[in-house]
Image (tube, rainbow, N blue to C red):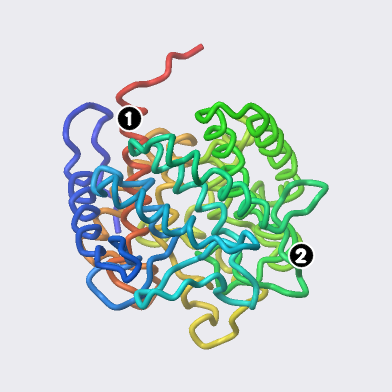
Amino acid sequence: MTSPTPAAATNEPDPWFTKLQARVADLLEHARQPHPHGVTSYTPAAFGAEYPALYLRDFTYMAESAPEFIPPGHVRAILALFAAHVSSEGLCPERISNDGEVIYICHGGRPVTDAPLFLAKLARAHLRHGGDTGFLAEIFPVLERTFATVPVEASTGLVWIDPAHPHTAYGFTDTIAITGRHFFCSLLRLEAAEILAELAGRLGQREPIERYTAEAARIRVGLEHLWSPEHRLYLAGSVDCRQPDIWGSAYAGAIGALAPARHHLVATTLLAGRERFLLRGQVRHLPLPEFWQRRVVVAEWTEPGTFQNGPYWATATGWMAEMFELAAPGAGLALLHELAADFETHGIWECIGPAGYARVANNLSSACLPYAAWKKLRAAAAHPRPQP
């Protein structure tokens, strides 16, 4: 598909952005449903029966990306629900099913690694959505307690997944056995540490500010252990799946985890290699011709070319657009236009692939995360920073 020509960086309406915005609002409306725990639930896919649960990470992405379409009371209630179900050991649920079951484990027999980190992200989304500090003060000890359960390499602060016991770490690679130092989850831990420092500041708690700020700085330094000069990208893991992480490398730039020179190098590397990981504006986890070297779930639906092992996802398109825009102004917007046009032609899917492969229609993260990045790029175009 040829990318539509991006509109100039003006205040004029962009019809492709407007189409995606409408899609986001519609999907959110049709993802809502009653929940047995008394909250308004949001399922990861609208209209259908796929993923019949309230997933913490998926809802967090929705609340971060499109707060204008989610009532603030819904965000607070869901945050309170997950905080209330943090176990006595500090474990945070990954999801709560539509039958009310509280679930801590996905694949591999150990608790999901990213849940405590997404709980912190949801707390920040609530704060930015007009949340009150009194409620956040109540749950702050819970956020700290569950943050402390994330498995970490003591010397670096990076998330560590035991190679002898692989399990779900980041939910969008939940079937993949990325072990040792885990790049994507380490980025999430960096975010969470910075969030806890920010919340502590809002609450007037000086000691946690210093502690979490120092931990975030330690993680930033530790990320260098996963840098690959050969690929000019970061590696997904240090033991299993020691492979160039397309998603993680883009996300590192999107959250400001990289120093300026490294940020630009990663951005230019991704733009130059785009033919190896893009299809119809959607993003592969790894560059072609690679597939993941080890899986937690070995089944037909995780074979090469299926699900998280080779198909292309819009979930990561927004992060990639931010990197492209840095490398070549206009390239990121062109990528988002291409994605929006593909949505109009083929619909919104969890992931797609060659020969008509597509899985789970009306997926919320596929629409919400690119929408969030698009808003960010539009805001930057409308208010450019002065040149030094």
For the residue marked with disc 2, what is the amino acid? Val
Looking at the image, how many numbered discs can be counted on the residues? 2
In this rendering, the answer to whether 324 lies above or below 37 is above
Please tell me which residue is depicted at 71% across the width and 66% down the height of the picture: 179
Where in the figure is residue 91, as x and y percent of width and height? Answer: 60, 62
Label 2 crowd bin: few (<14), some (14–19), many (20+), radius 10 Å: some
Please tell me which residue is depicted at 40% across the width and 53% down the height of the picture: 61
Where in the figure is residue 85, as x and y percent of width and height? Answer: 50, 62
Tell me the residue that label 1 is attached to: 379
Please tell me which residue is depicted at 26% across the width and 64% down the height of the picture: 31
- At mark 1, the secondary structure is helix
Please tell me which residue is depicted at 40% across the width and 72% down the height of the picture: 353
Tell me the residue that label 2 is attached to: 239
Camera-side residue: 93 or 18? 93
Q: Quick check: can you spot residue 157?
A: yes
Where in the figure is residue 294, as x and y percent of width and height? Answer: 67, 75
Label 1 crowd bin: few (<14), some (14–19), many (20+), radius 10 Å: few
Residue farthest along the top direction in this orientation: 388
Left or right of 33 on screen, residue 162: right
Q: Quick check: can you spot residue 228?
A: no
Q: Quadrant of residue 175?
A: bottom right
